[in-house]
Image: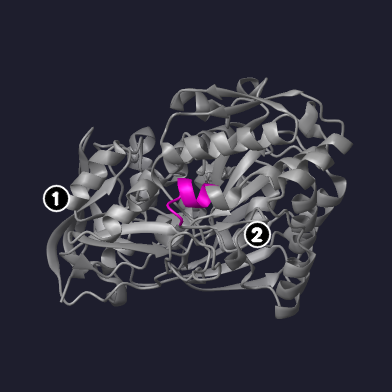
Amino acid sequence: MSSTRSGSPLRDGRRTHDRTLDRTHGRTHGRGRVRRAAAAVLASAALLVTSACSGAAADKDADRATAYKITDKTPAAAGNVDSFTWSVYAEPTTIDYAYSFDFPPNQILSNVCESLLRWNPDLTTSPGLAASYTNPTPTTWVYQIRPGVHFHDGTVLTADDVVASLSRNLDPGTASVWANQYKNVKSIDKTGPMEVTVTLATPDSTFNKYLAAGPGTVESAATLAKSGKDYGNPQTGVNCTGPFSFGSWTSGQSLTLKRFDGYWNQELKAKSGEVKFVFLADATTRVNAFQSGEVDGGWMVPPNAYAQLGSTEAGKLYFGRNTTVADEVVANLKGPLGNPKVRQALLMAIDRKGIVKAGAGGVGEVSDSLVTDNLWADAPPATREALLKDLPKYPYDPAKAKALAAEAGVDGQKVVIATSPLDSQTTIITQAVAQAATAIGLKPQIDSLSAEKYTTLFTDPAAREGIDLFLTFWYTSITDPLDMFASLETGAFSNYGNWSDPAFDAAVEKAVGAYDPADHAAANAEAQKIASRELPWLPLYTLPVSVFMGKKITGVQPSIAYLYYPWAAEIGAKG
């Protein structure tokens, strides 16, 4: 998740590891790149600790240990509720959108602030604060700002607010975690009373897509100017346009949002008078809070509690769409893993189905790609069929893997696998990878790091010295494989092993400049084919988003889009 994109200590980044997700996509610049990477890293650790994520469809694998299904929508709310409580595994350091690149701040901020476009739970994109937009030239995007929208302080949204909000991502002084998404932006200008034009230096097929996520967030220009460096902290909060407004923030305990009665979109008007986010770092404490009714719900349910929460009378466990893949990052290409045949052999020797069964509660699917299938929604049918045909696959075959490794010269070389004692899932994955390394003739050494030190693997190249492999859960923030592949270009901040392949770079750059869906998908497919053959990261498995809802509430749409979509507004009373 990005390192942590994907994107927390273990999204990008995320992904976490997933937040892992150090989703510092592609070529981030300066401090913005570092800040974003750090956020991603934090997410990654958290993901490892508490979650299961992915966009896999259910019932595809008859060997799946535990049957599960993807739920698009939980039963609609029958009415309003005064309030509900929601668990979050960590307290945000800020809810300033320029630095919100992790699960805790984003799942809160998505209900308070809005972007020009909206990423929906079905992973499609629709108009948001921009009522419409056009792309008159390959390097020009023109946005018509929605009229009659009020900020939480009662002031009216204007084009000036949009320009001020987006421009923060261009300012080196801000060091936005989203700076990389603006790498091709030349200027952002007010071109009419309610019109904003973004001019690019070069065509960029993903820029507009990112405006449905954090990079497109809009805040009051007056609030930004008044708050300055205090913007987004517990005392100041934020002043946006979403269905909930910032209420209060008690450091170390909770953050409360209040329903905004002046919200412009009647279809998403909040059904709850308030939402109280409770910070519960311990996974067992969170599960107990679900069982007792102390909290009404929460995202990222610990996998080892799936069976327990799947049968409790305290509420219901749901799984939803995700874009996350659990990966082992190859951090050292100078050692034995520098040979792609050794990387292929190692992947074939990893019992990935066993990991899903033992580490992910049987909920997930083995993946031969670094991206989930649902990211190819815009690709023509013929391209999607070709993807399955051309994608290199690595079925579990220890004997074949050992022979391939021997052919590549493996003979007892040491490989260091970094891990962190976050939860049983992390431990099981690490042990399985070590077992596979032994099976092909390598000598694995497991280095257990604190969560803090593990996080630095995603932000500090020096911390990766001597490390051959480490785990991440990487998710994307848009419905496009390029969000992941750009992270592996030569020189990309999140290209942790400094892997370089000219053909891969060419495919990624072609995809960046290709607006036509067929051409864009074809270039992405070429990048995927190369990455799956060369394996700069080893894809392990995908997992669905998990969410628990107590018996008092209903209405949420389980999806990774909860990081940017106002999911809490749809939650209300059960019938």
**Above or below 29: residue 144:** below
Which span of residues is magenta-colored?
A: 355-362
Q: Main secondary structure of the magenta part?
A: helix
Q: Is residue 349 on the magenta stretch?
A: no
The residue located at (50%, 58%) in the rendering is: 364
The residue located at (26%, 76%) in the rendering is: 76
Q: Nearer the viewer, mark 1 or mark 2?
A: 1
At which x and y percent is residue 224? 38, 44
Residue 481 - label? 2
At which x and y percent is residue 396? 68, 51
Foreground residue, 442 or 248?
Answer: 442
Foreground residue, 13 or 33?
Answer: 13
Question: Between disc 1 and disc 2, whose residue precedes?
Answer: 1
Q: Is residue 359 on the magenta stretch?
A: yes
Q: Quadrant of residue 113?
A: bottom left
Q: Quadrant of residue 393?
A: bottom right
- Looking at the rendered structure, the kind of residue marked 1 is Ser
State the residue position of label 1.
292
**Above or below 508: residue 234:** above
Residue 407 - label? none
The residue located at (64%, 52%) in the rendering is: 484
Is the residue under label 2 in contact with that under label 1 (CB below 8 Å)? no
Foreground residue, 491 or 205?
Answer: 491
Please tell me how crowded label 1 is: few (under 14), some (14-19), or many (20+) other residues with Cα within 10 Å: few
Q: CA distance from mark 1 to mark 2?
A: 40 Å
